[in-house]
Amino acid sequence: MATQKSKPSWADVKAQLRELDRAGLLTLLQDLYAASKDNQAFLHARLHLGDDVLKPYKATLDRWLWPDVFKNQHTSVATAKKAVADYKKASGTAAGLAELMVFYCERASGFSSDIGTDDETYLGALVRMFEQALTVVTTLPTAQQDPLWARLEVVRDRCQDIGYGVGDNIANLFAEHEGDD
């Protein structure tokens, strides 16, 4: 009787996958696809399927960066950042990643400005995502950069009234990257 590891690794999975034929692999993928919306979003993004592969990722950002405070919902920086990381793993196209990062900044700055928050983790994550968005946007062709720069400029302006140094940090980052485009 063979002994089983208590915690299988990728190497164990890979060894078992080698035993499957094409039909077995397709059945496994179909089962994974049916198992969760996250798996579906991953496969749609990886295979560039559908009109808007960013939609499920944006829905996650929207929920966790701008919760319904009247329903006693809370923010979750970790869940929002995970959505960006999941998209990056699934597809990682620079244009899609830039769009998602700019959307993150729009939602977080909007919530902070309109509703208000003193959550330093939330505000710090906004500043870091803004910097990452600037970096990714500058890698895009000029025609793709221009509308994203305009949206980041709106974020910069909105952040001036947030406080906690967010406005100054965002303005400095924007000024530093402005010459990169």
Image (cartoon, grey):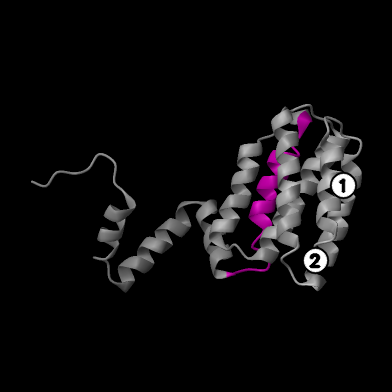
Can I make out residue 98 in this image?
A: yes
Q: Quadrant of residue 47?
A: bottom right
Circle 2 SS class: helix
Is residue 36 toward the left or the right of residue 81 in the image? left
Q: Residue at x 38, y 68 (%)?
A: 26
In the image, residue 106 above or below residue 147: above
Marks 2 and 1 close (CB-CB < 8 Å):
no
Image disc number at residue 62: none
* Foreground of the two, 158 or 44: 158
Is residue 46 toward the left or the right of residue 125 in the image? left
Percent position of residue 93, x then y = 63, 65
Q: Which residue is mark 2?
A: 145
Q: CA distance from mark 2 to mark 1?
A: 16 Å
Q: Which residue is mark 1?
A: 156
Sequence order check, earlier mark of 2 and 1: 2
Can I make out residue 74 in this image?
A: no
Percent position of residue 68, x then y = 76, 35
Is residue 43 toward the left or the right of residue 66 in the image? left
Q: Residue type at mark 2?
A: Gln
Percent position of residue 148, x then y = 81, 60
Percent position of residue 3, x then y = 14, 43
Q: Is residue 64 magenta?
A: yes
The range drawn in magenta is: 48-69
Q: Residues within 10 Å of mark 1 (few under 14, many from 20)?
A: many
